[in-house]
Structure formats: structure tokens, C-alpha cells
Image (cartoon, helix red, strand yellow):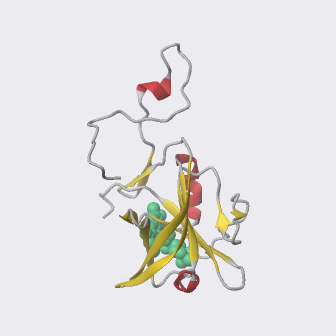
Amino acid sequence: MASFPSGATIVTTSDSDGRWWGFTASSFCSVSMDPPLVLTCLANTAQCFPAFAEAARWNIHVLQHRHADLAMRFATRGAAKFDGAGFQPDADGLPFLKDVSISLRCTTYSKVDGGDHLVLIGRVEEVGQAEEMPFVYFRRKFHALPLGDDQVAGKAGQAQSRASLPVVIELDLGWM
Ligand SMILES: Cc1cc2nc3c(=O)[nH]c(=O)nc-3n(C[C@H](O)[C@H](O)[C@H](O)COP(=O)(O)O)c2cc1C
């Protein structure tokens, strides 16, 4: 699976005592458009497993390249994951990080046995999106996406704010 390019996310929740938990996950994908569902998978052995197994809500943060260190911290068992990392409590008291590429606030749709992982299927209640590009996790490394010409400099030589990628082919298939 390390040869299948993916993004990287940090998934966070809070337990019944209000303690924050989170882990880095590359297992993130869409499940359904109506209702809007996404999934992520958590190892049964993770320290944060009991919190997510009980959680009614969780937040998914799709990371930008500047979050590479944070991705490693949230992949480290026993690390002080939230110390100085910039998370704020959301309306439900769950850890929420602004200024990520995409943020999704989810409620439980279902939790499914996935062998040695638990498949967390969340209903997306709120989406936040920033312009900056997510990075790509591929062959155990984080890669920055190449920027399109309009990101490097506009026609008048001014830097453009909107991120874009070189287009290979543009689809019009009604798929996400
Ligand atoms: C890029 C990357 C992607 C990861 N993806 C997943 C994943 O999808 N599911 C998972 O259970 N662990 C994944 N991990 C490992 C967990 O982040 C790591 O084991 C984490 O420490 C588990 O939480 P814990 O600290 O509470 O035990 C990934 C690690 C990295 C570096």
C-alpha cells in the first residue's frame, strides 16, 4: 500500500473525560455522497483506540506540507501530540486545527470490524477548505505537489493565491 499515493490526515476526538486523542491516518476516502460519508481505519492496537471506539464525533484534518512534523508526531505512540500544535476546542470540545488543507467535522455513521483495524465511517457535518495544497504520502515519504504555472507567477508577474496543478485531463463525469 505504501506505493499507492495518498494524502495524510490527522484524526482527532475527545473521550468522556474530555481528554484529547488523535492519530495520523492515510486510510481516508469518501464512501457516499448522499448521505455524505467518509471513512478512516484505526488499528486495534492504537493507544487512542478505546477513545475512537466510543466516540460519537471526530474531526479529520487533511494536512499541508508544512504539517509533516505534526504528521510524524501524531504517528508516535506516547508523544505529547497536542502540546503547542495549535489545536483549539471546536463547538463540541473536540480538538480542531485550523489552516489545514481540508477539515471535516464528522459524526458516527457506523463502525465496522475491519480485521485488525476498526473502520470508522463518519457522516460529514461541516467542511472547511483552504487554498494551500495537501501533501502526498508515497513510498514512506511525504512529497509536495508540483504547482501549476499560474501558482508560480501570473501573467503580470504577480504571484497567484489560488493553488493549482498541471492538468493531465479534465473529467466531467459527475464523480467527486
Ligand atoms: C503517513 C502515516 C499514515 C498512517 N496511517 C494510519 C492509518 O490509516 N491507520 C492507523 O491505524 N495508523 C496509521 N498510521 C500509524 C498511526 O498514526 C500510529 O500508529 C499512531 O501512533 C497510532 O495512535 P496511538 O499513538 O494512539 O497508538 C499512519 C502513520 C503514518 C506515518
Percent across and percent down for residue 139 are 35, 56
Q: Quadrant of residue 120?
A: bottom left
Which residue sits furthest front? 34
**Depth check, front residue: 118 or 80:** 118
**Depth check, front residue: 36 or 135:** 36
Percent across and percent down for residue 28 are 42, 64
Is residue 12 rendered to the left or right of residue 154? right
Is residue 65 rendered to the left or right of residue 35? right
Looking at the image, which residue is at 51% across and 80% down? 46
Looking at the image, which residue is at 55% across and 23% down? 159
Query: In the rendered view of the protein, which quadrant contains the N terminus?
Result: bottom left
Q: Quadrant of residue 119?
A: bottom left
Which residue sits furthest top? 156
Q: Quadrant of residue 83?
A: bottom right
**Depth check, front residue: 164 or 65:** 164
Q: On screen, 168 above or below 153?
A: below
Percent across and percent down for residue 156 are 52, 13
